[in-house]
Image (cartoon, coloured by chain):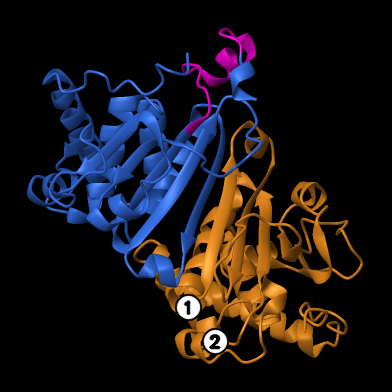
Chain colours: A blue, B orange
Amino acid sequence: MASSKKKETPKAKAKAKAPEMERMEVRLAGSGGQGLILAGLVLAEAAGLHDGRAVAMGQSYGPEARGGASKAEVIIADQDIDYPLATRVDLFLALTQEAADTYSWDLKPGGWIVVDSDLVSHPPSSRAVALPFTATARDKLGKPMVANVVALGAITELTGVVRRKALEKALLARVPKGTEALNKKALAAGTKMAKDHAASGQLAGQEPTSEDV
Amino acid sequence: MASSKKKETPKAKAKAKAPEMERMEVRLAGSGGQGLILAGLVLAEAAGLHDGRAVAMGQSYGPEARGGASKAEVIIADQDIDYPLATRVDLFLALTQEAADTYSWDLKPGGWIVVDSDLVSHPPSSRAVALPFTATARDKLGKPMVANVVALGAITELTGVVRRKALEKALLARVPKGTEALNKKALAAGTKMAKDHAASGQLAGQEPTSEDV
């Protein structure tokens, strides 16, 4: 269905105020306590409520998830989503080694792979972008628990999966009252981290949608 | 798969400390602002993290959802879930008329149908249990926004989909700091409402799993 999409769709443009997008599959993986379900919710709501996309989200819990690795998946598209499960992942974020190992078997060739540089010592690919989400949250923001938000800021800046403004709106609608400033700082830290990374020239060949156009 | 399940599975029993359960499909539907995604998360975490079940959850956002009706689906089972989407819904909660109309086409015959008695004037079935979630949240608790929690308390009491204690643990882990007392009250109001309803004798023929045994 997605491949039949025309280059210019005035309706989508007017509605979305965001660049056109083929189906994009995002997987956020880590351990139970890292807040990746919430990160997935925020990403889904940024895309669905603020960028005007169609969005499906799924996550799982239970003995398997509890054992260590857990994941949330978000599928984003300009058209209706006929199959709401991930089939080949365009953007994979892994915040632990176990998550990186467990959930990297169906990544799209040439897709984005982003990992926590301190917690994932063996990324699933040499192309992986490794950034210090947890260390930054802990050392610069004093709150390790916002590593998920730092990561959201970084993947959004790297890939443009949602608009930065949409992400911030969705985030501030979901976080506890009183933590808005902290979360905005975390988002900004992630954005800056990704910008610095891009400026360092390590991004060659990382554009994920090039083979879709 | 689910139908091959034996009556006694010592492993599941030891792990879960909750009654055995065939695959159970729960759909929570309403409008965007009613907090049903959060309710779904809480139910999923109660089942997956505290009752020891396997759980898959899915929800969708976007133009369709924004237009009015939105839904979250939670699939709960004792065994691994091979298909994470709803196929026939065992427990349907609808908090608006539009949601009741839009998402009631694939309900399991004999399954639970629970609606808000003030907001759903035409339930999808005459068997539907109609309870005043929103009115209770607004008039007795002073916070209409906890109607979702009142409803969670009621469907848990009615159906036993998760243990009450598991629900409360999961809820308190997800709600903003400082709102714990309010949310516990909302849960208790929902539980009481369902108990009163059961005592009133309107529950005959409502046991959802009878045809599975």
- Which is more N-terminal, label 2 or label 1? 2
Left/right placement of residue A93 relative to residue B49 reads left
- Per the image, label 1 sits on a secondary structure element best described as loop
Q: Residue at x 86, y 82 (%)?
A: B202
Could you tell me which chain the residue with mark 2 belongs to?
Answer: B
- Per the image, label 2 sits on a secondary structure element best described as loop
Residue B96 inside the magenta-drawn segment:
no
Could you tell me which chain the residue with mark 1 belongs to?
Answer: B
Residue sitting nearer the eye, A90 or B94:
A90
For residue B61, the mark is: none
Residue A124: quadrant of the picture: top left
Residue type beneath disc 1: Gly
Q: Residue at x 32, y 20 (%)?
A: A207
> Residue B66, how many percent across, how many down?
63, 36
First to last magenta residue range = A6-24
Q: Which quarter shows the N terminus of chain A?
A: top right
Q: Is residue B65 above or below residue B171?
A: above
Which residue is label 1 attached to?
B52
Which residue is label 2 attached to?
B18
Q: Are marks 1 and 2 in contact (CB under 8 Å)?
A: yes
Q: Is residue B169 in sight in this rendering?
A: yes
Left/right placement of residue A192 relative to residue B61 reads left
Residue type beneath disc 2: Ala
